[in-house]
């Protein structure tokens, strides 16, 4: 499948490192950023997925290199940044995207320390390592940008996934805090909080084959979906990848410290039945 950049070759000459770039959203962004002219470092735990993404980019005429990386291991994240410097001569864009879900529906009584550690180590500590080791390389270029992939679950709580929500809330705050500290180095730091239309693979076996995105929504009906925005098609990864591309591009050069919802208005919606509230209120005040 050919991926086109909606903003043309806006990343020409840039080098982007994407963690978790072997699958799902990371792969979608790797292909899109390459289509926009960037050279891509695919840092991925699963070597088969990693090579597939590199192949897809190269077959489309782009430049990419893979490096097997577990983002929860500091040395491996540092080595991924070194790969960018050795292969492409620098780093301009760090996208900390690798993430895992906590097991849905497990309540606080049953969450084990090991489950907590896995999600926090990959999602939050992995993002910390990515930021830490990218910064010296970004400084060498006179500035750059970090995009941390958070979730709608980092802005508002989703039921049944407290550890995941905590990890993503942490990513939002880390991003805001680093935006303040790194502004003087001309480094922009933002978090993207997608919801809806993301990779179904995240809830499957970690090494499962990539789910066909188009097959996910058989009977699309916006009225039964949680996002307020009604469209004639379901949300897809490209909706969020286009926002990511904009955020890492020079077109967003004054944007930093955001935790930006990409969610069809979902985070703007409160679960309040205003009609009933007003009814109760008028009854109690009469
Ligand atoms: N899937 C969703 O519904 C959803 C919604 C909002 C945000 N997100 C976030 O989007 C990001 C991308 O996830 P996705 O939806 O594409 O899921 P995904 O499972 O399809 O892709 C995640 C990729 O990260 C890799 N990975 C996992 N652990 C890793 C590690 N320790 N080191 C390096 N790579 C690792 C996986 O092998 C996979 O290729 C994550 O941060 C996720 O939390 C996902």
Image (cartoon, grey):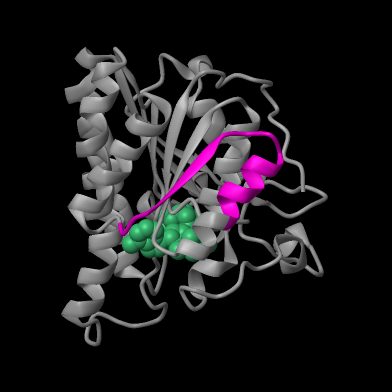
Question: Taking 225 as reference, is 32 above or below it?
Answer: above
Q: Is residue 280 visible?
A: no
Left or right of 77? Residue 154 is right
Q: Quadrant of ligand 1?
A: bottom left
- Name the residue: 36% across, 72% down: 102
- Quadrant housing residue 254: top left
Which is nearer the eye, 247 or 93?
93
- Horizontal and vertical percent position of residue 167: 28, 57
Which is nearer the eye, 123 or 63?
63
Which is nearer the eye, 245 or 284?
245
Question: Taking 240 as reference, is 160 above or below it?
Answer: below
- Name the residue: 23% across, 43% down: 78
- Name the residue: 68% across, 30% down: 5
- Horizontal and vertical percent position of residue 234: 73, 55
Magenta span of residues: 52-70
- Horizontal and vertical percent position of residue 7: 66, 22
Left or right of 117? Residue 49 is right
- Name the residue: 20% across, 70% down: 117
Q: Is residue 96 visible?
A: yes
Question: Taking 2 as reference, is 176 above or below it?
Answer: above
Q: Is residue 16 magenta?
A: no
Residue that protrudes farthest toward the bottom in the picture: 110
Residue that protrudes farthest toward the front in the picture: 86
Quadrant in which the C terminus appears: bottom left
């Amino acid at each position: 499948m050919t991926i086109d950049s909606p903003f043309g070759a806006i990343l020409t000459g840039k080098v982007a490192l994407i963690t978790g770039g072997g699958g799902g959203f990371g792969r979608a962004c790797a292909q899109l950023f390459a289509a926009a002219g960037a050279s891509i470092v695919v840092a991925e735990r699963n070597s088969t997925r990693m090579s597939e993404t590199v192949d897809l980019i190269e077959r489309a005429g782009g430049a990419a290199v893979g490096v097997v990386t577990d983002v929860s291991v500091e040395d491996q994240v540092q080595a991924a940044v070194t790969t960018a410097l050795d292969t492409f001569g620098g780093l301009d864009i760090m996208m900390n995207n690798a993430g895992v879900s906590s097991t849905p529906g497990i309540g606080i009584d049953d969450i084990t320390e090991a489950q907590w550690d896995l999600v926090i180590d990959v999602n939050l500590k992995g993002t910390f390592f990515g930021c830490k080791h990218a910064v010296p390389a970004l400084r060498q270029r006179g500035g750059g940008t970090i995009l941390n992939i958070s979730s709608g679950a980092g802005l508002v709580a989703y039921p049944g996934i407290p550890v995941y929500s905590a990890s993503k809330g942490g990513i939002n705050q880390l991003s805001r805090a680093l935006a303040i500290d790194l502004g003087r180095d001309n480094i922009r730091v933002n978090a993207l909080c997608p919801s809806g239309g993301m990779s179904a693979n995240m809830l499957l076996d970690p090494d499962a084959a990539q789910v066909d995105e188009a097959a996910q929504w058989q009977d699309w009906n916006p009225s039964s979906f949680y996002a307020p925005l009604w469209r004639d098609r379901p949300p897809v990864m490209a909706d969020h990848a286009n926002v990511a591309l904009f955020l890492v591009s020079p077109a967003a050069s004054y944007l930093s410290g955001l935790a930006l919802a990409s969610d069809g208005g979902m985070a703007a919606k409160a679960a309040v039945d205003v009609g009933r509230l007003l009814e109760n209120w008028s009854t109690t005040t009469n």
